[in-house]
Amino acid sequence: MSEHYDRGAITLHWVTAALIVANLLLGLSMVALPISPRKLHWYLFHKSIGITIFLLTSLRIAWRAIRPHPAPVPMPPWQRHAARASHALLYVLLLVIPLSGWLYSSATGVQVLYLGVVPLPDLVGKDKALGDALRIVHVSLNACLFAVVVVHVAAAIKHHFIDRDVALVRMLPIVKPPGIVHS
Amino acid sequence: MLPWALGALAFLAAGIALADSVVVDKSEIGFTMKQMGVKFDGGFRKWKADVVFQPKALATSKVAIDVDLGSIDLASSESETEAKGPLWFDTAKFPVAHFTSTSIRDLGGDRYEVVGKLMLKGITRDCIVPLTVRTDASGNRVAEGTFSLKRLEYRIGEGEWADTETVDNDILVHVRMVLAPAA
């Protein structure tokens, strides 16, 4: 019964995945750097990648509305609910985390210059206490994202190797789903 | 005898320019720099100004300002520590910036020009500060002005920061002095 995801959904999924991994690593590396021109450049890249993830996620939600996803592979109801909840949480986090970063940047008085070209408006005024609070919010939300991504990846591996279903394969960009998918 | 004495006293009083009292909590010394393509505001929490400003006696009017560079406000303790370091202000060796006026010119209307010397990080250069002077509702005289300085002329931001692609060479300095009317 299950179908393959369409090419747009697959592309958006994997591009977003790559950007998330890159930005988590970049975020952790840049905060450890001593203040320097390199650090400021890495911050600019980090913010640009974050805003890109926000835009891609918005696009994915719109895409999903136009081209609905295939029905979930057969699984117990609790797993279906858990999958639904974790996917929803991923979308929410991928929208909220960039916004929290943008808010944090505004609160520290640094306007976000998307891709080094497009100035984004400051969402809040410069406020040191608010900035400190938003930093904690941004880091905590990323810790949540990391946890949900681990569950997401673990579930994909379980579906593939233990349940031996097509949940993972139908999202892969190259491997075509085996014939049984349409049987 | 008495009229002569009074006359002499009046002459003396006119000659001795009484220092204006600066309303510190309404006055400010701040700056705007351009960092990674976006403007960033900062300021100084501690400074001292000796101002004698008499529009009708500009020859005896003068301004002397000492800025405690260690009191820099950048809304981030990491940036503030860096700003006090040897590559920027080097406050261990040069804790104070001095401005001393050499002349004040009337440009007509409410506009004036304070010409003076700015000593920053052991380097003294000529400096011209255009001001507008207005009287506020409570009778205070409000002098406000902005001037541009090139940070590299004062060796502010050396080494890896000397590249103006990260932090622009031009720094806009804003001065706002509120002078209470003489008692």
Image: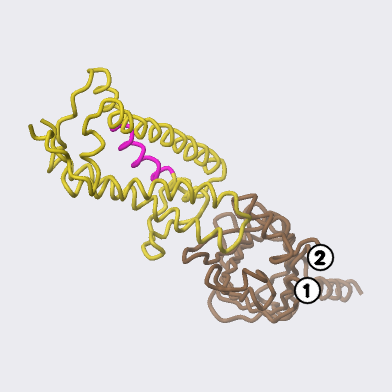
Chain colours: A yellow, B brown
Q: Position of residue B24 (x, y in %)?
A: 68, 55
Q: Position of residue A154 (x, y in %)?
A: 37, 31
Q: Which residue is mark 1?
A: B122
Q: Residue at x 55, y 59 (%)?
A: B41
| Residue neighbourhood size for the residue with mark 2, other residues' Cα within 10 Å, grouped as few (<14), some (14–19), many (≥20) | few
Q: CA distance from mark 1 to mark 2?
A: 9 Å
Using the image, tell me which numbered label, if any, was put on residue B93: 2
Q: Position of residue A153 (x, y in %)?
A: 36, 35
* Chain letter for mark 2: B
Write the start and end of the magenta stretch as one range.
A87-100
Amino acid at dot 2: Lys
Q: Quadrant of the C terminus of chain B?
A: bottom right
In front: A141, or B116?
Answer: A141
Residue B25 in magenta stretch: no
Q: Is residue B43 above or below residue A161?
A: below
Q: From this viewpoint, which residue is outermost toward the left?
A: A183
* Chain letter for mark 1: B
